[in-house]
Every structure is written in structure tokens, then in C-alpha cells.
Image: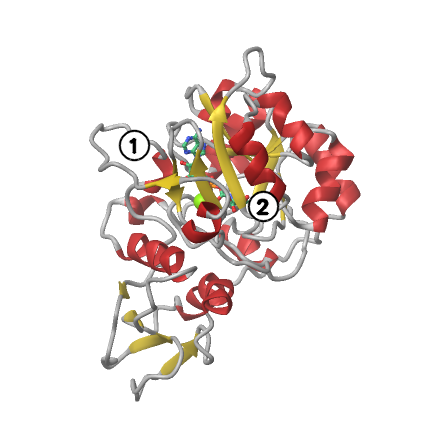
Amino acid sequence: MPCKNIPTPLTIAQATERLKQGEIAAIPTETVYGLAVDATNDQAIARIYAAKSRSQNNPLIVHVATTHDAALYVEWNLRAQQLADVFWPGPLTMILAQRKNSPICKRVSAGLETLAIRVPKHPIALEILKKTSLPLAAPSANISGTLSPTTAQHVIDGFKGQVLVVDGGQTKIGLESTVVDLTQTPAIILRPGSITREKLQAVIPIGQPAQEKSSQPKSPGQFGKHYAPKQPLRLNATNVEQREALLSFGTNSIENATKCLNLSPKGNLAEAASNLYQMLHELDHPQFSCIAVAPIPDVDVGVAINDRLRRASQKSEVRGQRSEVSTALK
Ligand code: TXA
Ligand code: MG
């Protein structure tokens, strides 16, 4: 439900000030909105976990302004430099060993020896990073398990108006960054995104992930139900039932949906990615029994779209907890 008390958007200067004071500010990135906080401030980090109802074992991504800044916090190496040369600033998160005596709080990496780091490609995020001169931890600005936010309004609605947001309009890419683990050889993709396997492989060798054997997955955020609307999702739909909404792609012969949105009438996967969360937010309404999603080709960015849709359609216990706004923000 849209929030009625719409807080005044934060200016860049106000967000900078809040972040320096250890407060939370939601900021736009090129992928999704992030719930930013000073990554060196332990109390502020604790509040982020609480605000999102996020499991303490799910580490956060640190955002920095430049490659030079990244190398202050992680053990920089040739492969990281090769990827940074091509993809930073941009939607690529690298997992690297943390530097000893790093000022980043242990809580950011949930006790792991590694750190997830990226330089975002959004003028507002970059300006805030430069103005604060801080490494900013910024998970997606949603309650854990729910749909990711691609507009300021999604953040306001998700946190019932209790998070202040810098409004940068709709995010361009619309899917979270690709996460690549450089602590292994060859490197592996922990979370697919708009920087695809093929694009990465043109720069460094990328391996296939081994089946997760341990109970502690390499990327703790990548298990269980995630990115989910409140209404159920039905994937690879070739028809639409009564009371179902339809999320379509390209041209197909599915007819008679009460409400239909098309991710990309032209069948363009990048366009589909940028519309995915926005359209799921729009169709996530109790008047529909379910959101039926037409098949999306499992190639290129389609791999990342299908990854999110599969996780969003999983059944799990997340449902009960997720509409609650944490008291941490009150
Ligand atoms: O595009 C994005 O990456 C957005 C914007 C705001 O930058 N952020 C984002 O953060 O998606 P979040 O917290 O929603 O997802 C971070 C993912 C999770 O799957 C988490 O488990 C994984 O990155 N991650 C973080 N640190 C890690 C680490 N040290 N090792 C393995 N995975 C890690
Ligand atoms: Mg997230």
C-alpha cells in the first residue's frame, strides 16, 4: 500500500550529514536503492540489520568512491584490477580477502574474513561517497525477503515512511549487482546480474560453482526465499487463470488477463531487467490471486532475471516477518 505520509526527500547535503553522524540514509544506485550507513560505525551497522530484519549471518556490500579506496579495505590483486578496469564504476561486487586492521566493522562481513565491495555508477551515490569520505555499507533498501526497491517511493512504502530517501528517480539497471567471488580460482559468480558470465569471462576465467555442500553457503544472502512480492508467483506461465495478473515478456499468445504488464514488448532482456521490480511492485495487489509470469529466455541478463524470479517464487517462512517495520527505525 502506498504510504500516505510522504516524507520530504533528503538532499545530498542532508544525506551526507546524516551518514557522517552514523544515521541511515537511503540512496539511489544504478541497480536498486540502498540503505546506506557508515561501514566503520558498529552501532550504525547494527541498526541496518535491525531495520531490515536481516539475519546477522548475511554480510553487507561496502560501497566506495574509487578503486583506490577499495584497495584500502581488501587485499587488491591483478584479477580485481582487471575487473575494476572494465566494470567499475558499475554493477559488479567483488568478494576479496579483507585487509588486516581494516576499519570496516566485523559486523559488516558477518564475521567472514572476506569483504564484498563495489564502486557504484550513479552520480548521486558517487557524490555522497565523495562528500562523506566514508566507506558506506548499503544493502538493498527493503525489508529482508521482500521485493527490492527501484524507486524512492518503494523505499518509503517498504519502511512505512520511516526511512529518509534521496530521490534519484527510477534506477536504470533495476537488478542487484553481479557478485563475483575472487577468493577462489577460477572466480565464481555468487549472484548473477547485468554483468553476465560472458562479459566477465571476456576479462578473467570464471568457473562453475560447486554444489553447496556446507550448511554455511558462500553467499549467505543467496539462499531461501528472496525478492518476493506478497502475492504468489507462477513462473513460465503459458496461460492466465481467473483473478491472476500477468507479467508478460515479448510477444506471446496469452490472453484475457484482468491486468497485464509487459517487461519488454520488444523482447529486450535489459529493458525487462530494469522493469522487473517496478512491475512486480505494481502487480503485487491483493485483488490478484497470483502473478503469472511468462517464460523469460535463460540467456544473457535473462539468467539474472530468472534467478530472482525463482527465489521470489520459493515457499518459505519469510512471509510472516517481512511486512513489519523494525522498531530500530522508530
Ligand atoms: O546492487 C547491489 O548490490 C545493491 C546496491 C544497493 O548496491 N546491494 C545489494 O545488497 O543488493 P544486499 O545486501 O541486498 O545483497 C548483498 C549480497 C547478499 O547476497 C550477501 O550474502 C552477499 O552480497 N555478500 C555480502 N558480503 C559477502 C561476502 N563477504 N561473501 C559472500 N557474499 C557476500
Ligand atoms: Mg537485497
Q: Position of residue 319 (x, y in %)?
A: 30, 49
Q: Position of residue 16 (x, y in %)?
A: 74, 37
Residue drawn at 75 percent across, 36 percent down: 130
Q: Nearer the viewer, residue 86 or 195?
A: 86
Amino acid type, label 1: Pro
Look at the picture and state if 318 lies above or below 45: below
Amino acid type, label 2: Phe
Residue 240, image quadrant:
bottom left
Residue 249, image quadrant:
bottom left
Q: Nearer the viewer, residue 148 or 306?
A: 306
Q: Position of residue 230 (x, y in %)?
A: 34, 59
For disc 1, the marked residue is: 217
Q: Quadrant for the C terminus, please.
A: top right
Q: Secondary structure at mark 1?
A: loop
Label placed on residue 87: 2
Residue drawn at 71 percent across, 54 percent down: 8
Residue 247 is at least partly visible in this image: yes
Q: Residues within 10 Å of mark 2 (few under 14, many from 20)?
A: many
Q: Nearer the viewer, residue 164 or 117?
A: 117
Look at the picture and state if 158 lies above or below 57: below
Q: Is the CB–ligand 1 distance for label 1 below 8 Å?
A: no
Label placed on residue 62: none
Q: Is the CB–ligand 1 distance for label 2 below 8 Å?
A: no
Q: Residues within 10 Å of mark 1 (few under 14, many from 20)?
A: few
Q: Secondary structure at mark 2?
A: helix
